[in-house]
Amino acid sequence: MGYERNVQQRQHHGLPRKGIRHREYSSFLTRKQSFNCSQIPTGQSVNNLAEAGFFYAGHKDFVRCFSCGVLIKNWKQGQDPLIEHRRKSSSCDFLQQPRIHEHHDERASVPSTSNENVDRLADDIQSVLNLGYDMDSIQRAYQLCHETNSGLRSVDINQLTNRLLDLTVVDQIAEEPTQQRQDVDVRDQSLQERTPSYIQRIEQEVHQLRETLMCKICMDNRANVVIMPCGHFTACLQCSSALTNCPQCRVGITSRIKVFL
């Protein structure tokens, strides 16, 4: 909500009132709400489209500027809404606002992940899911690989599987008993004493697993999107499309990968 308020204040300040074609979409929030998940053009985010002055025009991937009325369609992966807006309608009053240029420059300075790398990572994640690993373990392994690489190179499937094997060994060692009991009576007594707490721990782990797989935004749908570049798994496809920053670590979102669980 704070993000949307800042964008609206930035875009309303100094906006010429003369010649606006679609005054009902003058606010950032109104333009954003004109979209839903099935209407978002290929490779675009709702926030970027709304920030560039566009609202959904009601057909396929067509969007229209609320100020100059220019219609843009047939979007391709990697196209920048603001650049396309300038190319089609450079004299648009909305584009003359200094704050629009400043915000676009800030957003453009965030490094993006190439489409090829994103596609490869999506295939890698699906491959290790097919091996029987759960999404929580894959996320832990990816984050450890990403920290090891220090962002200098992308994570490949060999790194990911090796890290998953390491985590599996560590988890198995952690589950092994620290002491072998020789006396059967003492062992049985200890087992009886531990049973209630063990059941409670299992119940807590099941509850935590359910929370891990739940979208942290709507708390209704299962999370099914990996946010890049941080690799966090916190939102469903519908909610993630409206985000510009990861809700867990606040890093700027460069792309999203849908995962089929």
Image: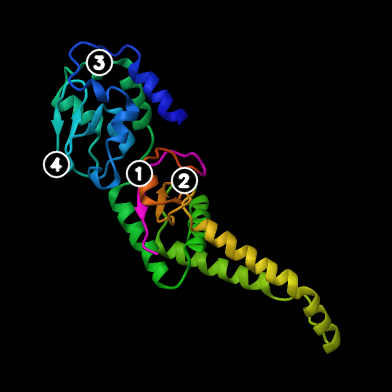
Which percent across, then down, holds residue 71?
14, 31
- Residue that appears at 37% across and 42% down: 254
**Magenta: main secondary structure:** loop
Label 1 or label 3, whichever comes before in sequence order? 3
Which percent across, then down, holds residue 235?
43, 50
Who is closer to the viewer here, 189 or 87?
189
Name the residue carrying label 4: 74
Hey, what amino acid is under mark 3? Gln
Q: Secondary structure at mark 4?
A: loop
Hey, what amino acid is under mark 4? Asn
Label 2 or label 1, whichever comes before in sequence order? 2
**Quarter holding the N terminus?**
top left
Q: 10 Å neighbourhood of mark 1: few (<14), some, or many (≥20)? A: some
Q: CA distance from mark 4 to mark 1?
A: 19 Å
Q: CA distance from mark 3 to mark 2?
A: 35 Å
Hey, what amino acid is under mark 2? Ile
The reply to whether the C-beta atoms of the residues labelled 4 and 2 are less than 8 Å apart is no
Hey, what amino acid is under mark 1? Ser
Please tell me the numbered disc located at residue 217: 2
Residue range (magenta): 248-261
Which percent across, then down, holds residue 27?
32, 24
Name the residue carrying label 1: 241
Would you identify the image quadrant in which residue 67 lies?
A: top left
Name the residue carrying label 3: 96
Please tell me the numbered disc located at residue 188: none
Say if residue 183 shows up in the picture.
no
In the rendered image of this protein, does residue 195 appear above or below residue 70? below
In the rendered image of this protein, does residue 195 appear above or below residue 89? below
